[in-house]
Amino acid sequence: MNYFPDEVIEHVFDFVVSHRDRNSISLVCKSWHKIERLSRKEVFIGNCYAINPERLIGRFPCLKSLTLKGKPHFADFNLVPHEWGGFVLPWIEALARSRVGLEELRLKRMVVTDESLELLSRSFANFKSLVLVSCEGFTTDGLASIAANCRQLRELDLQENEIDDHRGQWLNCFPDSCTTLISLNFACLKGETNVAALERLVARSPNLKSLKLNRAVPLDALARLMSCAPQLVDLGVGSYENEPDPESFAKLMTAIEKCMSLRSLSGFLEVAPLCLPAFYPICQNLISLNLSYAAEIQGNHLIKLIQLCKRLQRLWILDSIGDKGLAVVAATCKELQELRVFPSDVHGEEDNNAAVTEVGLVAISAGCPKLHSILYFCKQMTNAALIAVAKNCPNFIRFRLCILEPHKPDHITSQSLDEGFGAIVQACKGLRRLSVSGLLTDQVFLYIGMYAEQLEMLSIAFAGDTDKGMLYVLNGCKKMRKLEIRDSPFGNAALLADVGRYETMRSLWMSSCEVTLGGCKRLAQNSPRLNVEIINENENNRMEQNEEDEREKVDKLYLYRTVVGTRKDAPPYVRIL
Amino acid sequence: MEVINGLNLKDTELRLGLPGAQEEQQQQQVSCVRSNNKRKNNDSKEESAPPPPAKTQIVGWPPVRSNRKNNNKNVSYVKVSMDGAPYLRKIDLKMYKNYPELLKALENMFKFTVGEYSERQGYKGSGFVPTYEDKDGDWMLVGDVPWDMFSSSCQKLRIMKGSEVPPAL
């Protein structure tokens, strides 16, 4: 099979970068499997319980970069109880023991402790990059170890984590010799920041391209930081509740004008609208703008800023921008590829006339031909609008629509939204991710099963009528990897129809559905390569009962494929069948 | 012919269903009130819109991460733990106007009763003591400071078992 020596093949493999392609290469023959695994530098593990650290290291001893994901997606919305799992410590311990030359660690929805961070910082001399997304369990003490011990640190990126801020001096822990930082993001820290230490750090980091500050960094400090780092490409601004005095404002404007490389702007965690004009000069260069935390800014201020951002490709914003604001986006941002509109009023209690509706969505779809990803929270929708959107934008890869009120029908015709979503899946042949909402019957799932051939992830909430709905999806969407369902009337018949199917998927989540304990047990019986986890709210009562009622509905079911059997770190209220 | 927003719905209506599915679709038009745990099933079918749902919050809905929820000044979620319970919970402090409301909500959530509060002796009688962590990181007894001061400085709540409470509290 091999006409070339291994080194040549390995060199060819260097050009193959995507995980899926490398996985495919490794299946060709034994020789390629061996060459591939010994040369693999980056490994992606979508479910940390699908494999264990020992097998990872056994297969890829030369790995330099590891990505791990822990808790299921719905954990982001408090549906997964505390202490469920996803602990990173065993992984770091195993990598350290085996002396793997780890340089990069990217974690999502995992439990990270100060102990793990300390161990990480001491075990890998070439460690360069730590990215934590939606993680929890650590404090600023853990960050201090990373700062102090990772001599080659280039990237520390903390996105939306729950970090206990001990108001310590972690920024001071970067040694004076540390000059290699390229990216520093601590926007999610809630406590005070040692601004002087930060300024010194930025001043000695000539390669710093990305800097995202937290609430506690005031305006005048921002001006000084930007003056030190005019090479910044990506800036996350902190918070300025008060209107700036003219002198500070002038200094800020001068600093901003020098940042000609700035392409991405975010933060604005609390900001007086009058600060925004300071950024007008660089708006024409921006390709990414995240104003989704700027709760206090009204639509018209946002609009003035956005009107200048003609090159924007990515926009994250709050629904306070309104349909009018979205019309401006549609008219201005012709390069727009990704839009996320978040709800500013999460409980839906205010009668907010300024919030977005289906009108804004249609306007965007008509004005932005390159749009491929959307996340849209709104209070109302119509089939006609969705049909128009599908016609305007057949290129969607990700389409997530969240109508705030469960079961809400088309607000004009009072029909279900089956036809609207049906139009989306039929037109968007490349659709990989879909979230549906509003009033939906089994019909929408028939459409999804028929048309969404590339669909890999589907999120369902408060939808469907019978088991047929779920069956349409499982039978139709051959590429499905992650299916998550809540509060929908799907039960055992759907769950058990094709048990082998679940080994072709990463995971299935079902909460507040109709599946019973008996159904889950039957599922688990014939599936040694699936972990079937049951989480029940009243676990205290359950443990006292001697007789189990198999007809009892299961609160939360999470099943996933695995090659390493039952995990040993589950808490008592998680039952693995 | 229904024309909405310049769109003639019948013309643009996509017929995506399988042959014979037409009838099913017409039936869907009427039953727009879906049953779920929170609403009655036998609402009149003539109603064009279901009554607005009660202000009870559905767990995990809408699907936004906690740090976004707390960004809105109208909400203030804090974690609540109780000694011996496996689950932590979260409550929105802004939903309560005073201590009795908060304590009642906690009692309902964790199924316990709090004792009687007195300034000198703290909570007597039930064996459970509500405490909280303030902005300085100190653990305090719930109830000592005025409500507004408490609700703006409370970061976390912990319901301690009486036996665990240090004498200083």
Image (cartoon, rainbow, N blue to C red):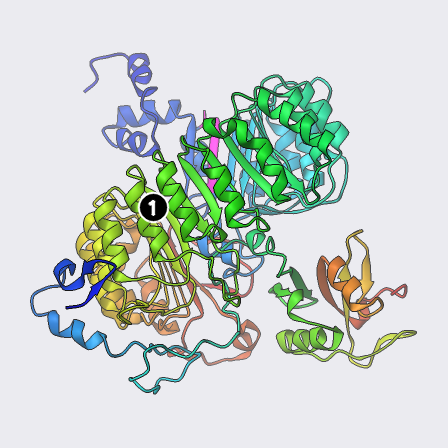
Does A322 appear in magenta? no
Q: Residues within 10 Å of mark 1 (few under 14, many from 20)?
A: many
Residue that sits furthest to the right in the current view: B120
Residue labelled with disc 1: A364
Left or right: residue A532 compared with residue A115: left
| Figure quadrant of residue A242 | top right
Residue that sits furthest to the left in the current view: B19
Q: Amino acid at mark 1?
A: Ile
Q: Which part of the image, by quadrant, shows the C terminus of chain B? A: bottom right
Whether residue B64 is visible to the viewer of this picture, yes or no, is yes
- In x, y percent, where is residue A175? 73, 22
The subunit letter for the residue under badge 1 reads A
Q: Nearer the viewer, residue B9 or A226?
A: B9
Does A62 appear in magenta? yes
| Figure quadrant of residue A512 | bottom left
Q: Nearer the viewer, residue A38 or A392?
A: A392
Q: Nearer the viewer, residue A529 or A301?
A: A301
Name the residue at 76% across, 28% down. A196
Q: Which part of the image, by quadrant, shows the N terminus of chain B? A: bottom left
Name the residue at 44% across, 36% down. A56
How many circles with numbers are drawn on the protein?
1
Q: Nearer the viewer, residue A317 or A323?
A: A323
* Circle 1 SS class: helix
For the record, the magenta segment spans A61-68
Left or right: residue A138 compared with residue B19: right
